Image (cartoon, helix red, strand yellow):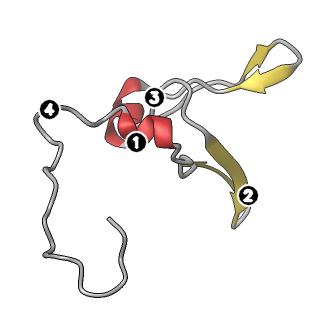
Amino acid sequence: MKTKIQKWGNSLGVRLPKSITEQKALRAGLGVSIVIKDNQIVIEPREEELSLESMLSTVSADNIHKETDWSKAQGNEVW
């Protein structure tokens, strides 16, 4: 697929076609790394750092687990 490099403020930018963003699950705001590999420019999605807030935002009444009773205390545990 061909595209053009365009001026974006003081930088240059390339627009990614929708078909590529959908295939690679890219979205606005996703962090990427830009590296040169074998003399080619490669854009790779970065692993997102998980926060407690982002993980808890996916918990719902449908997927929350119930408490598990593992038996009575066996030693000096304080419950």
Residue drawn at x 61%, y 43% is 32
Check disc 3 and report the residue beneath it: 27
Residue that label 2 marks: 36
Circle 4: residue type = Ala
Query: Distance between the Cα atoms at labels 2 and 4?
Result: 45 Å
Labels 4, 3: front one: 4
Instruction: Measure the C-alpha gap from mark 2 to mark 1.
Output: 33 Å
Q: Residue furthest bottom?
A: 75
Q: Residue 69 vs residue 57: left or right?
A: left
Q: Is residue 52 left or right of residue 69?
A: right
Total labels: the figure holds: 4
The amino acid type found where label 1 is placed reads Met
Spatial CA distance of label 3 from label 1 is: 19 Å
Q: x, y percentage for residue 10?
A: 89, 17
Q: CA distance from mark 4 to mark 3?
A: 27 Å
Q: Which residue is mark 4?
A: 61
Q: Earlier in the sequence, mark 2 or mark 4?
A: 2
